[in-house]
Image (cartoon, coloured by chain):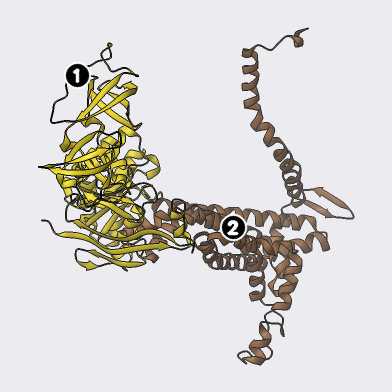
Amino acid sequence: MAEVEVRLTQVYKAFGGDAAGRRVAQYIKPDEHGVIVAVDHIDLEVREGEFFSLLGPSGCGKTTTLRMIGGFEQPTSGLIELAGQDVTWLPPYKRNVNTVFQSYALFPHLTIFDNVAFGLRRRKIAQAEIKTRVREMLELVELPGYENRKPGQLSGGKAQRVALARALVNKPAVLLLDEPLGALDLKLRKQMQVELKRIQADVGITFIYVTHDQEEAMTMSDRIAVMNRGKYEQLGDPETLYERPATEFVAGFLGVSNLLMASIGDRDGDYAAAHLADGSTVRIPATLKGPVAAIKIGVRPEKIRLYAEGAPVPEQMNRLEGQVMDASYLGASTSYIIRSNDGERITVFEQNLARTSHGSLHQPGQKVQLAWLPDHTFAVAADGHATAGGPDGA
Amino acid sequence: MRSSRPVSPRASRAWRSRLGTVTPYALLAPGILWLLIFYVVPVAQMFIFSISTGSLETGFQITYSLDAYTEGLSRYGEQFGNSLVYGGTATILTLLIGFPVAYTIAFRGGRYKNLLLFLVIAPFFTSFLIRTISWKILLGDEGPLLGPLKHVLGILPGDASLVSTPYAVIAGLTYNFLPFMILPLYVALEKIDIRLIEAASDLYASRWEAFRRITFPLALPGVFAGTLLTFIPAMGDFVNAQLLGSPQTSMIGNVIQNRFLIQNDYPTAAALSFVLMAGILVAVLAYARVLGSEQLTG
């Protein structure tokens, strides 16, 4: 396993009513003492060379966590280490870390060359070396020949590349990215996601990426920490987070998921029985069976097959009955909203392979059977906390 | 009748587009008119005076004589010099005092920003004259500043005096024009994105370097506006020199005021005004050049 590059130990950050507090106060309600808890005792290890994402909604503490690693804020308590060295109280300019800011924060009065060279000059690198390194870096972000322009003359996408070059040219141990693609339009964002991943692979620097866009995090990250209310609920690679979410929050935040209340019954080989509210019984992987009896089981919309009423369903599959409420034809797939017998709404995505819109889709009002493989079922505790016996995400 | 016909949409559009071209001029008109009557006309009148000869009793005739200019320049070099030195020193002092104040309000003011800004302009609620006279008391020989220094601390000899010295004039000018420096500086500093300073610090700039490379260059428009708003009126000021100074500390404003209102020597007063105006104009252009190129190279 690669070495740990960044380690956070019991990092806790609370804001008072000062200027920094006002940034987070728009997302988080202060408690009765006026204290805003942004980051609540986080332990985190980011490995050398990985693309690590902090994913979560506004106010989950992801940006504050990033800013503490960057040195722009100090934790109320806890320890931050970079490559084994305690940097908790070091100012930003003494850390071997660089940041790509959400608003790019390019210096408007300096040329692109001077922007990119800024960090190198502060480190008293020789003039000739600065020249070559800036040129190389502008080539890496595909902006050669822009040296003498001013930031105001660049489009958002190009400004973003300059911001990236300005940080990367210093060859930091860790690059921090605070929602760097947030201001770009969708097409450019997709393009930059691919490019960021390429650049990260090229330079081999550890990236810590903050975003609220789950798709963005999934596209680029080696591992993701899904954050909520100052903590992370689950940490793992994108596939694990999607296929085996540990909490209701993670299941809901990453993609669409269908959650059904269930009580766990007896174990039968590799599977355990789960009794649903409408009286039917489905099977879930036995590894998910924890000591908590009341849980929610989940299944992703694309894992569900639809069968007409009365049609034979393969025996190994979980089966549930329902009625089509809505069908939306989306081209590559069709999205259905199905109501189960006890009134739960279940979303189903079906590839348009056999069925097309020419009268062969399931129509609203039609009774259908939903079927999915037991292995595609996941379970979360009903109160939102991970089941004790659930699989460890990381 | 034509006018009773409903207006076609096309006609109304044409009318509206014509209104669009006229509106800016209509909005500018009152200001232009005001400047024409109360600025251009008096300046022209002043110019005519400066090339005239005569007195208030006999009347002034345009003689195209440049005597007023040559006489004014040859006799009042010292007062021009005083204006330049006092005005310039006061401008530098307001910048040195005003920058930290504006910086603190802009970046550390927090919720007290508006209150602090109000405090900056609060002195304007009292007459300029009264405030300057009270400085005479403040700086007086036995006043609250010199008194304790002489008698309590014993640092200064008993006959030390500030009033009637150039220091008092400069102090008065600095005090009176300080808000004109602080406000434009504040506006320029307030606009600076705090993330730029964070970015500089992220890129290994110490606090001082971040200030020197980022904050100060970005505040230059405010420095420029503030120094002009201070230097130009300070150059022409006569109240501070009159109330806080002595005949030896006369500024060119005092001479102009004296020539106009006491000796009624309009030609010399007008000529001096023009020389002052030209001098300030040249100084400002040179200043704009230097500052402008500095902003480009960072």
Q: Looking at the picture, which amino acid does disc 1 mark? A: Ala
| Number of marks in the rendered image | 2
Q: Chain of mark 1?
A: A
Q: Amino acid at mark 2?
A: Leu
Image colour for chain A is yellow
Kindly identify which residue carries mark 2. B183
Residue B290 seen:
no
Location of residue B78 in the rendering, given as x and y in whole percent from the top left corner: 65, 68
Q: Quadrant of the N terminus of chain B?
A: top right
Q: Residue furthest right?
A: B57
Q: Which residue is mark 1?
A: A311
Give me the chain that's brown.
Answer: B
Which residue sits at x=27%, y=45%? A295
Mark 1: which secondary structure? loop
Left or right placement of residue B258 versus residue B214 in this view = right
Count residues near mark 2 (Cα–Cα under 10 Å), then give few for <14, some for 14-19, many for 20+. many
Q: Relative to A222, does residue B93 appear above or below in the rendering?
A: below
| A268 left or right, relative to B112 | left
